[in-house]
Image (cartoon, rainbow, N blue to C red):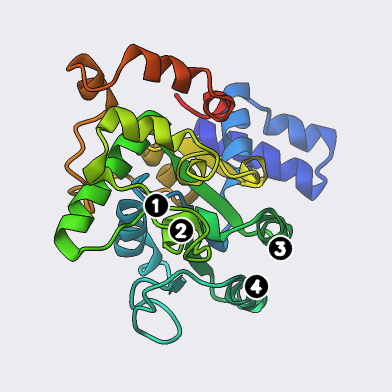
């Protein structure tokens, strides 16, 4: 008999209540394999409802596109993405879902025989929502990014967007800030600030919303820094899918924090202030 089949029969045999003699015939021959199978079975429920907490400028568009095009449609998921045509209205709403809408989707997914998927940016979720989703056994997940690189990306993304459509993505009423009142704070103008000045401004309390971890981060089921290895592991762990990378999407002209630091565009003083910031310290648990 194939060793793995003998092993699995032993596990199932005990569940069926076979006597000791019968169980001995199906002895466990590989304890490591037993642990691996138990771990995989525990983390891979059949077509679990999914809630993607999209942290702005952390590859969320890429993740969303990859999941939909390579897994979710084929697996028969009911897709709820307010920015794409994948929603009840069959058109882009050009906004995030409201809390009321998220609760409605949560209940529909819980009652449905068809698995559900929902997407919303991280500042339009809150701890109560995350707790309620998790209580109904939705898999909540979020990918993050080294915050220094994230802020550099925001700087160049904002410059590109202002140049292209004359609108800033880092204003208070934008989706990245959680759709606050339009005068909640004065948006930074990257065209009037050097990168070094922009990073320092991002450390102020009203601007931290764009890069600090949400206060509900430890309530999310799965949080990882986005990179090819972590995304590959995520896809296999929860979908048994072999990752085949696509072309990046929604990229800014950002070359990365290290590049700008090495080329003298970010000062030692700014780096020290960032490294000692209490919100940055919270990232250390999650970054590779």
Q: Earlier in the sequence, mark 3 or mark 4?
A: 4
The residue that appears at 56% across and 40% down in the rendered structure is 40
State the separation of the CA atoms marked 3 and 4: 11 Å
Eye-nearest disc, 4 or 2: 2
- Residue 187 marker: 1
State the separation of the CA atoms marked 1 and 2: 7 Å
The residue that appears at 56% across and 43% down in the rendered structure is 222
State the separation of the CA atoms marked 4 and 2: 24 Å
Q: Are marks 4 and 2 in contact (CB under 8 Å)?
A: no
- Image quadrant in which the C terminus is located: top left
- Residue 136 marker: 3
Q: Which residue is labeled 4 in the image? A: 103
Q: Are marks 4 and 1 in contact (CB under 8 Å)?
A: no
Viewer-proximal residue among 88 and 128: 128
Residue 195 appears in the rendering: yes
Q: Are marks 1 and 2 in contact (CB under 8 Å)?
A: yes
Q: Which residue is labeled 2 in the image? A: 172
Q: Quadrant of residue 39?
A: top right
Badge 1: residue crowd in 10 Å (few <14, some 14–19, many ≥20): some
Across and down, in percent, residue 26 comes to 67, 33
Across and down, in percent, residue 230 comes to 40, 35
State the separation of the CA atoms marked 3 and 2: 32 Å
């Amino acid at each position: 008999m194939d060793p793995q089949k003998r092993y699995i029969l032993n596990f199932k045999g005990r569940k069926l209540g076979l006597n000791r003699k019968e169980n001995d015939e199906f002895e466990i021959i590989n304890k490591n394999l037993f642990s691996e199978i138990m771990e995989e079975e525990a983390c891979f429920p059949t077509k679990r409802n999914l809630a993607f907490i999209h942290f702005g400028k952390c590859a969320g568009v890429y993740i969303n596109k990859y999941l939909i095009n390579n897994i979710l449609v084929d697996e028969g998921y009911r897709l709820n993405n307010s920015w794409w045509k994948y929603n009840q209205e069959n058109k882009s709403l050009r906004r995030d879902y409201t809390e009321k809408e998220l609760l409605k989707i949560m209940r529909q997914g819980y009652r449905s025989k068809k698995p559900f998927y929902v997407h919303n940016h991280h500042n339009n979720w809150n701890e109560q929502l995350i707790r309620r989703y998790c209580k109904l056994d939705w898999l909540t997940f979020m990918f993050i990014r080294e915050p220094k690189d994230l802020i550099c990306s925001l700087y160049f993304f904002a410059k590109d967007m202002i140049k292209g459509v004359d609108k800033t993505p880092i204003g208070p009423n934008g989706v990245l800030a959680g759709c606050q009142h339009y005068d909640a704070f004065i948006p930074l103008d990257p065209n009037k600030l050097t990168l070094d000045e922009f990073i320092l401004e991002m450390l102020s309390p009203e601007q931290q919303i764009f890069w600090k971890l949400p206060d509900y981060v430890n309530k999310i089921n799965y949080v990882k820094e986005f990179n090819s290895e972590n995304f590959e592991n995520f896809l296999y762990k929860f979908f048994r899918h072999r990752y085949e990378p696509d072309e990046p999407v929604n990229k800014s002209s950002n070359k990365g924090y290290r590049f700008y630091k090495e080329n003298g565009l970010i000062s030692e003083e700014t780096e020290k202030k960032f490294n000692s910031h209490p919100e940055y310290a919270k990232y250390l648990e999650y970054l590779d």
